[in-house]
Amino acid sequence: GAGVSQTPSNKVTEKGKYVELRCDPISGHTALYWYRQSLGQGPEFLIYFQGTGAADDSGLPNDRFFAVRPEGSVSTLKIQRTERGDSAVYLCASSPVPGTEAFFGQGTRLTVV
Amino acid sequence: QQQVKQSPQSLIVQKGGISIINCAYENTAFDYFPWYQQFPGKGPALLIAIRPDVSEKKEGRFTISFNKSAKQFSLHIMDSQPGDSATYFCAASTNDYKLSFGAGTTVTVRA
């Protein structure tokens, strides 16, 4: 596709459930990032992939959060035992190489009820 | 805690006027300062960026002013248009990928 694609656009889940959020980066982009944006706030860094490996996962809030990018393209952010405080917009971005402009997707709005 | 402080939280400007958004930071290791524009339901889009070796950068109606000694930088939107109504975020990073964002400024341009 022409841009970064994130699915689903919206996800409502019950507290304690497991969710997966998908990101399709721009074709050929080696760098991929996940950010989380709470209402009325700026995005907060979660994790950065260079190729298949997580080069920096220092922003993941706890061990309930995990992300993979097994083939160096599509990435999945996984959240176990969801809590109401996890409700936010999860943004994915990609760039051709690190240090160049990052292109953001439209985000997945996660609501935990 | 927020590494980049942004103000104001919101502003209203008349069409044709100048919008000014300010940001301040503490980490002197920051070496990349981008501004992003975000419309409702969309992801942030890079507007303009600056590195600390220059004090000003202009692209069309958008200008970044950078004051390294004061650890401040600002975005000026000249000749503001209704289509500029959006939320603007300043950001900073030390390595170009791990961006620390400000809290955002909602700009409303009145026709």
Image: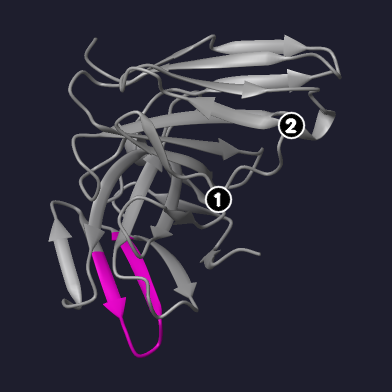
Tag 2: amino acid: Asp
Q: Which residues are magenta?
A: B64-76
Q: Nearer the viewer, residue B18 or A36?
A: A36
- Residue A41: image tag: none
Could you say which quadrant of the image residue A20 lies in? top right
Q: Which residue is tagged 2?
A: A86
Does dot 2 land on a helix, a strand or a loop? helix
Tag 1: amino acid: Ser
Left or right of A109, for residue B38:
left
Q: Are marks 2 and 1 on the same chain?
A: yes
Q: Position of residue A87 (x, y in %)?
A: 73, 28
Q: Residue at 61%, 47% (x, y): give it.
A: A41
Label 2: few (<14), some (14–19) or many (≥20) C-alpha neighbours in 10 Å: some
- Residue A58: image tag: 1
Could you say which quadrant of the image residue A3 lies in? top left
Q: Nearer the viewer, residue B68 or B27?
A: B27
Q: Which part of the image, by quadrant, shows the N terminus of chain B?
A: bottom right
* A30 is within the stretch colored magenta: no
Helix, strand or loop: magenta stretch: strand
Q: Position of residue B86 (x, y in %)?
A: 44, 39
Q: Position of residue B6 (x, y in %)?
A: 52, 64
Left or right of B16, for residue A78:
right
Left or right of A64, for residue B46:
left
Q: Residue at 13%, 51% (x, y): give it.
A: B60
Label 1: few (<14), some (14–19) or many (≥20) C-alpha neighbours in 10 Å: few
Q: Nearer the viewer, mark 2 or mark 1?
A: 1
Q: Position of residue A58 (x, y in %)?
A: 55, 50
